[in-house]
Image (cartoon, rainbow, N blue to C red):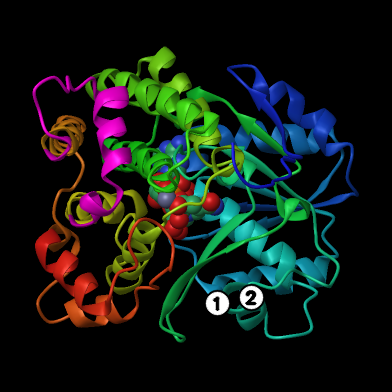
Amino acid sequence: MQGNFTYHNPTKLHFGENAMACLVDELKNYGPVVMLSYGSGSIKRNGVYDAVMAALKEAGKTVVEDAGVMPNPTYEKVQEGCRLVRDNKVDLILAVGGGSTIDYAKGVSASAYCEEDAWQKYWVSHKDPSCRTVPVGAVLTMVGTGSEMNGGSVITNRKAGFKLGKVFGTDLFPRFAILNPRFTMTVPQYQMVAGFFDIMSHLMEQYFAGKADCTTDYINEGLMRSLIHSSRIAANNPQDYEARANIMWTATWALNTLLKCGKGGDWEVHQIGHAIGLVTDATHGMTLASVSLPYYRHVMHDGLHQFVRFATNVWGVRPEGKSDEQVAKEGLDCLEAWMKEIGVVMHSGELGVTNENLQAVADAVLILPVGYRTLTRDEVVEILKESM
Ligand code: NZQ
Ligand code: ZN
């Protein structure tokens, strides 16, 4: 292991079919007013809303309803949430949904009492809150982002022309998260496999960085192998509880700060994905799927040793009698075959990237000086063209 790090994750997780039984006790740790934030209504159709409301009632809470958090939540919506928090003196924001709802809740928590321009302070300048924040709790209904156990808050600001992620400190991690795999069974197939790819992308973004022999990479490989195995089962039979539960647990560990210990990270695929999301409003995991292969084939030679390791340790490619290039390339071919097998979107053209808006997408990509290669703007355009 190289470098220095502090590992501290304060989120308390309750996992499994009976996890909801823990919600009432968790709620008792907070004041009387709970803002219930959720999306467009899937929780009303699948019974999760009723279960949450029953727990809130049992805990004697006053509930402030905050519906309509959209996928790729907007800064406008965050500002609406802030007003609700202030007007009702909210003691806890309970986010019930996927990454969008939980990211949104963190954004509201940090911004409600912020006296500066919150967009500028957090998402552009990456500063930490210096005001009071509101505790966030989560009931997860869609698997992928890891938002249930991290400080990430990805917000779209169309006026500013960016979809940006802020990683808040441990104060804004959900204080608790309820993870019942059954709650995810009603997620449509398209969203489900987009989530699977999001997990794989989080694993790869952290894996493809650095040169050292690092325990973290071995943990990462184990998670990738578990995800590949279970995703094949779940893509064919979404009702397979064991596979869905494994994937839920994998998603949490894929992005709860463990896998960056002793490592840098790349995250350029996510920057390109966010720019596609900004322009097309496409589903996050699919934006990543559509650009990953062109991106990794582009940077493969810069981090060849790790692409060889990926091929052999994750996909079981036999290296005998082959050059490193051949082995690395075979690994990416295996990734491609798996993506097709689970059914993710392979081309950004299918998500709405066109010759007309391609430059706008490229201009909105943040180029990070990390990973094995720092892209030029022209390379971003090249990768986007290949992805279409
Ligand atoms: O609006 P509702 O009714 O909630 O419907 C949602 C939404 O339409 C639906 N859904 C969720 N649970 C369901 C369900 N439908 C039926 N049954 C259920 N049980 O699924 C759709 C997508 O939900 P969303 O929350 O948008 O998905 P996801 O969890 O993939 O979140 C995506 C957002 O998270 C950000 C992304 O950029 C994107 O904005 N990310 C957050 C990260 C973090 N916090 O660390 C990291 C990620 O890389 C990512 O950037
Ligand atoms: Zn992601």
Q: Nearer the viewer, residue 62 or 254?
A: 254
Provide the residue designation for mark 2.
79
Residue type at tag 1: Glu
Q: How many C-alpha atoms fall within 10 Å of the one at disc 2: few (<14), some, or many (≥20)?
A: some
Q: Residue at x 25, y 82 (%)?
A: 360
The answer to whether any part of residue 278 appears in the image is yes
Q: Where's residue 196, x and y in %?
A: 35, 36
Left or right of 86 in this view: 296: left
Q: Is residue 191 above or below residue 183?
A: below
Q: Is residue 388 above or below residue 379?
A: above
In the rendered image, which residue does mark 1 sit on?
Answer: 76
* Residue 126 spot, x, y in % from top left: 63, 72
| Amino acid at dot 2 | Gln
Helix, strand or loop under label 2 = helix
For image coordinates 30% across by 53% down, the residue present is 288
Q: Are marks 1 and 2 in contact (CB under 8 Å)?
A: yes
Residue appearing at x 76%, y 66% in the figure: 85
Tell me the quarter of the picture where residue 153 sits. Answer: bottom right
Q: Quadrant of residue 2?
A: top right
Work out whether residue 198 or residue 91 is closer to the camera in this orientation and state it.
198
| Left or right relative to 300: residue 180 | right
Q: Residue at x 28, y 35 (%)?
A: 189
Residue 247 on image: x %, y %:
43, 26
Disc 1, SS: helix
- Magenta stretch holds residue 365: no
Q: How many marks?
A: 2
Residue 301 is covered by the magenta coloring: yes
Rendered location of residue 155, percent (x, y): 51, 67
Quadrant containing the C terminus is bottom left
Query: Quick check: 99 left or right of 200?
Result: right
The quadrant of the picture occupied by the N terminus is: top right
Image: magenta residue range? 298-325
